Amino acid sequence: MRVKSVIANLSLTVVSVLIVLMIAEAVSRFMVPISPGPSLLDITGKPIRQSYMEPDTEYRIITPDFDAHTSITKDGYRGPASQGNPDTLFLGDSFTFAQGVTDDKAFPYLYCREKQLNCANLAVPGASTLYTVSRLEYYLKVKGWTPNNVYLFFFTGNDFSDNLWAAEQREKGHNYEPLELNPEREEAQHDGLPTHKKAIDYALKHSNLMRVMYYKVLAELRKSNDPDAQKAEMQKALAITKQSLARLHTLSEEYAFNYRIFVIYPEPEVRLAKYKEMDAIIQKIAPSKITSLGALFSENSHDYFFPADGHFTESGNRLLADYLVKELP
């Protein structure tokens, strides 16, 4: 009888824990949705593994928030293609790439259409500032482009960490292009993980509650447990970013183009007005006056960012395009 009682109690405990976890999972998906990351499908809906910038291709980017048809030109940048030598170039990561909307809803396209400019969107999902400036240099030197204006968009949500990673790869003599351009390398890295880390990756892919714990709770605990290490890492990231922005300035002098640096913030930082302090920090490392976009999205910010994925919605892209039309020549 005692054994049966123990088994019954254990079973009840397990069932209770499972029910609590199921409720917590459901609540987390509603209160703090975090995307498991995008998947790529071909136009027919078949899953594919390829570079985000594979030349002369069309595909769909899928997350819980959107299903966005995306095209890449034969020269390896987001469509539509420029007509010959573009007048204006856009640089950045997935925000400038406008991940989550179709080509004709992306803010670079909307701006260039309104201004009747010949443009090229060179943004790459996952790109560090180091890679972004190197990519610009390639199109200037190899493609022979001679733009009049270059607009770089810096995203504070992950560009600092991306710059740390890219600088580390470069110091080791490795390729520092984003993994979004090299799915084979990304897959090889995953296959080389120990079993427990593969299990964590699986849980992060399938559980929003796990993503909240890992990306939100644990991240804050790490910051609070070792603030000095966090500060040192940030200072290193700022120094790396400063070098890349200085390289952009040098290129502008060598190739005689004008440039502007815009700063994009994640929705929580916009909503809580945390961008104001970061504006001053980034301005100190920038070679020219930056343009903060924090205040632009501050009113009804939830309308302009996808809730789980975090990128700009169609409304967010439209708002930014309208702002640029007024702000830029």
Image (tube, rainbow, N blue to C red):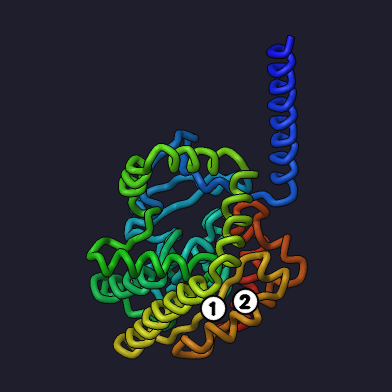
**Quadrant of the drawing holding the N terminus:** top right
| Residue type marked 1 | Phe
206 horizontally vs 178: left or right: right
- Cα–Cα span, label 2 and label 1: 7 Å
Residue beneath the point at 45% across and 84% down: 259
Q: Position of residue 65 (x, y in %)?
A: 63, 48
Nearest the viewer among 168 and 252 is: 168
Residue 136, relative to residue 289: is it above or below? above
> Which numbered disc covers residue 55?
none
User: Crowdedness of circle 1 by 10 Å Cα count: few (<14), some, many (20+)?
Assistant: some
Residue placed most toward the observer, 214 or 246 = 214
Estimate the x, y position of residue 60 in percent, counting from the top left: 49, 45
Residue pictured at 28% horizontal, 71% vertical? 138
Residue shown at 46%/66% (left/top)? Answer: 161
The residue under label 2 is 293
Tell whether 155 sits left or right of 91: right
- Crowd rating for badge 2 (residues with CA inside 10 Å; few <14, some 14–19, many 20+): some
Q: In the picture shown, does residue 235 fall above or below 77?
A: below
Q: Earlier in the sequence, mark 2 or mark 1?
A: 1
Judge by depth and name the residue closer to the eye, 117 or 103: 103
Q: Which residue is mark 1?
A: 262
- For mark 2, give the secondary structure: loop
Residue 74 in view: yes
Q: Looking at the rendering, which quadrant does residue 72 occupy?
A: bottom left
**Residue 34: image location, x then y, percent:** 62, 50
Q: Determine which quarter of the picture holds residue 137.
A: bottom left
Q: Is residue 42 visible?
A: no
The amino acid beneath tag 2 is Leu
Are circles 2 and 1 on residues that touch, CB within 8 Å?
Answer: yes
Image location of residue 256, percent across then percent down: 34, 88
Instruction: Name the residue at 53% across, 87% down.
Output: 283
